[in-house]
Amino acid sequence: MSRSSAQANLERQLMLARAQLAMYARDLRMLVHREQRVSRQLKATNLQLRAYARDLKVAFDAEHRKARELERAYADTLLRLTQASRYKDEETGAHIQRLSHYARTLARSLGLSPEEVRLIAEAAPMHDVGKVGIPDAILRKPGPLTPSEWAIVKRHPEIGANLLAGSPSRLIEMARSIALTHHERWDGSGYPAGLKGERIPLAGRIVMFVDTYDALRSRRPYKKPLSHRTVCDILLNGNGRTRPSHFDPRLLETFSQIHEAFAQIFARTAD
């Protein structure tokens, strides 16, 4: 091959290489531009998502505040109804406080969730709200009730449940359930429906138990207060009127392990 031919061939190869490099450069520029465009789109999308997240958090926080305010309003309603029911009966403010503390202690010891413990403790004081519908002459009667008077008193669980029915609040619904079932007994001998065993909601079983404990410990016009030791013996072994069969066996077992906490609660908030 002559020198001129070799030179011409080299120039052709160089031209081809330059053309390929130009194509590669063009493709690279297009790729860079596309990546930059995608990057800008991603940044814009990211900013938009952050704005959505911020707006969603603001909306969620507002709804959460509204829910808490509504729950506080429900709790205030419960408190006022509780106070109204206290004026109808001999129950004291200390009794109401103790009942809440007992219920919280027992529910927590049973392993319930913190939210369930809170609801039961806050709703427990409403157990006798239905007594607002019972005549004072019967509630405050110093002597024994006649069968017809006792039948009227036994309506108060259903009266209380009707007062609290229809609310979307979990707290009010818990209070309604407790008001309706806190006189039911594990063996089916309670009222108003004669429910038996686990057909009785756990919250009702808990409040029935702690209310019995406090009633036995407290002074009433018709009875003297009993010591913690005596009440423990009555609850766990019976005394004729109060029997272990009235209570959920799991509650009795748990109480036997934590009963000193009940004694401390009573001592702190005695009438």
Image (cartoon, rainbow, N blue to C red):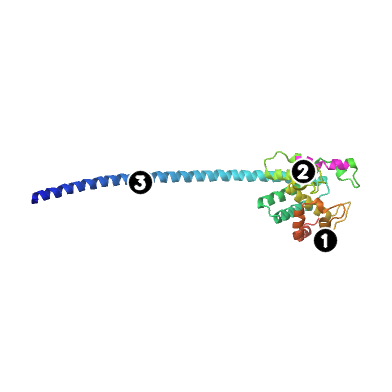
Near-viewer residue (14 or 118):
14
Q: Main secondary structure of the magenta part?
A: helix
According to the image, label 2 marks what residue? 180
Do the CB atoms of the residues marked 1 and 2 lie less than 8 Å apart?
Answer: no
Q: What residue type is disc 3 on?
A: Glu
Where does the C terminus fall, quadrant-wise? bottom right
Left or right: residue 140 versus residue 253 is right
Q: Which residue is drawn at the image coordinates 74% and 44% (left, top)?
A: 177
Give whichever of 258, 188 is nearer the camera: 188
Q: Amino acid at mark 1?
A: Arg
Left or right of 179 in this view: 46: left
What stretch of residues is rendered in magenta? 149-161
Q: CA distance from mark 1 to mark 3?
A: 80 Å
Q: Position of residue 76 (x, y in %)?
A: 71, 45
- Of marks 2 and 3, which one's residue comes earlier in the chain? 3
Q: As rendered, which of 100 and 247 lies closer to the eye?
A: 247
Which residue is under mark 3? 35
Who's the residue at 86% across and 41% down the image?
A: 151
| Residue 201 visible to an observer of this rendering | yes
Q: Is residue 153 magenta?
A: yes
Farthest residue, direction front: 1
Callout 1: helix, strand or loop?
helix
| Residue 259 on image: x %, y % | 77, 59
Indicate whether 74 appears above or below 216.
above
Q: Report crowding for label 3: few under 14, some 14 to 19, many 20 or more residues within 10 A (C-alpha).
A: few
Mark positioned earlier in the residue sequence (1 or 2): 2
Which residue lies at the image location 45% right of the left edge and 45% below the top edge?
47
Task: Give whichever of discs 1 and 3 has the lower sequence position.
Answer: 3
Q: Which residue is mark 1?
A: 229
Task: Report x, y in % for residue 174.
Answer: 71, 45
Whether tag 2 and tag 3 are in contact, CB under 8 A, the answer is: no
Element at label 2? helix
